[in-house]
Amino acid sequence: MGTSLRKMHFLAVSIWTVCCLCCGVQAEIFSSIGQMTDLIFTERELVQSLKEYIQAEESKLAAVKNWANKLDMLTRTSTSDPEGFLAHPVNAYKLVKRLNTEWSELESLVLHDPSDGFISNISVHRQYFPDEEDEKGAAKALMRLQDTYHLDSESFSKGKLPGVRYNAFLTVDDCFDMGKTAYNENDYYHSVLWMQQALRQMDAGEESKISKAEVLDYLSYSVYQMGDLRRAIELTRRLVFIDPSHQRAGGNLRYFEQLLSKELMERGRDNQEPADEKPIQLGTYERPKDYLPEREIYESLCRGEGVKLTPQRLSRLFCRYQDGNRNPRLLLKPMKEEDEWDNPHIVRYLEALSDEEIEKIKELAKPRLARATVRDPKTGVLTTAHYRVSKSAWLEGEEDPVIARVNQRIEDVTGLSVDTAELLQVANYGVGGQYEPHYDFSRRPFDSNLKVDGNRLATYLNYMSDVEAGGATVFPDFGAAIKPIKGTAVFWYNLFRSGEGDYRTRHAACPVLVGSKWVSNKWFHERGQEFRRPCGLTEVD
């Protein structure tokens, strides 16, 4: 075999091997900010490879060089503080969008005269790129943040978010793609908001790849689907004026006008009222109801509204030093404990984790992070769900002295045995990461996973990062909102002493608006706690 032939054979085998190793990796990139930081460096490496390619064929690839220069500046900023840069949800969305869509377009551009260095580099990295589902997931995350925190599309487009450290903007094309994502999901409410924002920026003179007729086409039909016939007619007339030969516009206009005439006749009115001249904005149309009955209460708590911490309740909350019933390990340095809520009793422990411990836990967990699952209430099978957007990993005490030390500390301060507790679960929330209202305890009395160690008695939740905006732990039933504070932990019981579930403890992790949220959980089970938390005959704790 000749030298060049051997090189080609080796390259083919190498690429095939890498593909085989990675073909089983599930994308789900957008669901963890911590893992998305790797994409920052991937993108930076791709930019460098691209620049080298340009140097070889400068005269033929002037357009590609402009692309590289633009991304070079962006990646210099992002690599200096990857997690902080990705803390801005728009940066995270645009990173996913670039790697899923725009780099692919660039690859097609250069294939007509390939450069071995660049093509081999991007081909190897492609298997780690976000896919269509990631881009769609990131877009839906921005819409979720928009709904939860009552943010209009312009706030996102101009990067006007609380606590941000980096500027980020959405172009007309970005807004159009957001609206199109919603439209393809039959989500006309969000399609209207984002197509309207795209149109607003186009009317202000911003250049784009898409035409105004395309935007008006999607916007007018979405407005019609929201039941606003008059505005749909006005938008369609504008579309016909811009593009008289548009394939659907004329037919849609006649159809809308017929519907409106029929509606006016049924009301016994002859004159058509003019369309509302106010621009479409958040609140123009009512958001459709969904499956979650406490949606409004949950989201208001996430915004810091409706918290029922009255002066009377506040007077019943205290702070103390917790020595774990004179535990020898806590006598010299007891844990600082604060009441977060009186009934059900929720406490926060201060200085529960050191910065060094947090970094070690994140270091151990990050390579193993996988999309978090939930147990299907009907089948009991673990599955992914759109209402839980995060990645998690499970760490054993034997893996590292830090994990063993943290487990021991949790046992000491709570007074509960960790022998039957679950492994330490580490979770990192992605773009708009959340976990909608849920119970930690099982409501299926014959669940097979309860037969050995019993139900989840209590929850111990470590906060391993500060979150600039959003990300609170909220309890819709009694109106509590607990802010994540790095190094602290919160603790509550999920079951009454009778063993019955305390349904008041239904709680949620609010969507992360700005920041990267890291937590670790320890769930205690009933078995082994018989003498540490004796049973009672009533549900009263």
Image (cartoon, grey):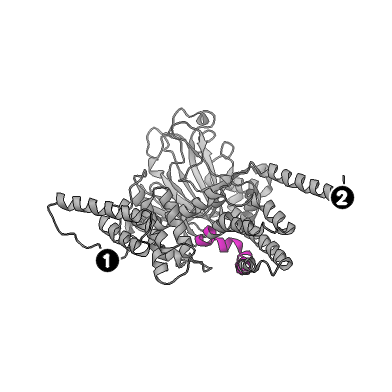
Q: Residues within 10 Å of mark 1 (few under 14, many from 20)?
A: few
**Was residue 74 drawn as part of the magenta stretch in this picture?**
yes
Stretch in magenta: 69-93
Q: Which residue sits at x=52%, y=36%?
A: 382
Instruction: Tell me the quarter of the picture where residue 316 sits.
Output: bottom left
SS category of the residue bearing label 1:
loop
What residue does disc 2 label?
3
What residue does disc 1 label?
277
Residue lying at the far left of the rendered structure: 268
Amino acid carrying label 2: it is Thr
SS category of the residue bearing label 2:
helix
Check if mark 2's residue and mark 1's residue have beta carbons within 8 Å: no
Give how far apart the Cα atoms at labels 2 and 1 are: 73 Å
Q: Is residue 115 visible?
A: yes
Q: Which of 21/441 is in front?
A: 21
Q: Residues within 10 Å of mark 2 (few under 14, many from 20)?
A: few
Amino acid carrying label 1: it is Glu
Residue lying at the far front of the rendered structure: 245
**Magenta stretch mostly in which secondary structure?**
helix
Instruction: Tell me the quarter of the picture where residue 351 sits.
Output: bottom right
Q: Is residue 167 left or right of residue 1?
A: left
Q: Which of 30/253 is in front?
A: 253
Give the x, y percent position of residue 284.
30, 59
